[in-house]
Structures are given as C-alpha cells and as structure tokens.
Amino acid sequence: VMNRTRLPKEVNRILFVKNLPFKIKSEELYDIFGKFGPIHQIRLGNARDTRGTAFVVYEDIFDAKNACERLSGFNVADRYLIVLYHQQDRMQKKLDLKKRTQDLQNLKEKYGV
C-alpha cells in the first residue's frame, strides 16, 4: 500500500501553468504533463488575456504534486514554465470582490451617488 501522507492544503489535482509559448498545442502539453500520470483534462487559454496559460487536471493528486514540483522552471521553446496549484478559493474571492464592486457601482448609479 502506497503511503498516502497528508498533503499541504494548497496541493490539488488542478495545476495552473503560466509562461507557455503561445503556439503550443494541447497534444504537446499532454506529452509533457502526461509523463507524471493520467490526465483528466487540459484547458489551454486562447483568449487574449489567457494566452500562454493552461489548466492541467490530473486524475490523481500525487501525480499533480509530482508534476508541479518537477515541471516548475521546465524549459519549453526557450520559456521557463511556471507551474502552480490552482487556488480555487482565491479565484472565488476575486470573483466575489468583482461582483461586490459591480453591485456597489450599480447602486451608486441607481441612486445618483
């Protein structure tokens, strides 16, 4: 039985990858990240503000941890990958803040403040 040690809270199956070459194909990402274990899904950013980023979702959290540790700083086409754990709650906080700011703006406009 493999030793399932307790993992730090931020470790999860979803990796957020930055600094990718804009021309990279998802097949190439499967090649690079697939070496560490089965991949559930890869989503490559293709909007102007998300180009050069991707989400890589592993089936297993330990594969994700291994990939995150080993591929940070990995050189792809003269770019060094930045591999982070996807922070679900941080993203949620950003969205909540955006929504609150928008709500406040709407109220101000409604009451002419």
Image (tube, rainbow, N blue to C red):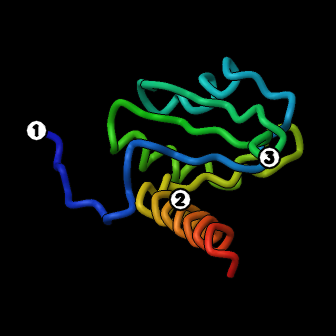
Quarter of the figure with residue 60: top left
Q: Residue at 49% across / 52% down in the picture?
A: 86
Q: Residue at 62% across / 74% down in the picture?
A: 111
The residue positioned farthest toward the left in the image shown: 1
- Image side of residue 13 versus residue 54, left or right: left
Residues at marks 3 and 1, CA–CA distance in whole angstroms: 44 Å
Circle 2: is it few (<14), some (14-19), or many (20+) Cα within 10 Å? few
The residue positioned farthest toward the bottom in the image shown: 113
Residue type at the position of mark 3: Asp
Relative to 100, is 46 above or below? above
Residues at marks 3 and 2, CA–CA distance in whole angstroms: 16 Å
Q: Nearer the viewer, mark 3 or mark 2?
A: 2
Q: Nearer the viewer, mark 1 or mark 2?
A: 2
Relative to 46, is 82 above or below? below
Q: Residue at 10% across / 38% down in the picture?
A: 1
Find residue 31 and report its horizontal and vertical position in percent: 62, 23
The residue to which callout 3 is attached is 49
Q: Which mark is residue 95?
A: 2
Q: Which mark is residue 1?
A: 1
Using the image as rendered, state which of residue 41 and residue 36 is in the foreground: 41
Circle 3: is it few (<14), some (14-19), or many (20+) Cα within 10 Å? few
Q: Earlier in the sequence, mark 1 or mark 2?
A: 1
* Quarter placement of the C terminus: bottom right
Find residue 78 and report its horizontal and vertical position in percent: 89, 45
Quarter of the figure with residue 108: bottom right
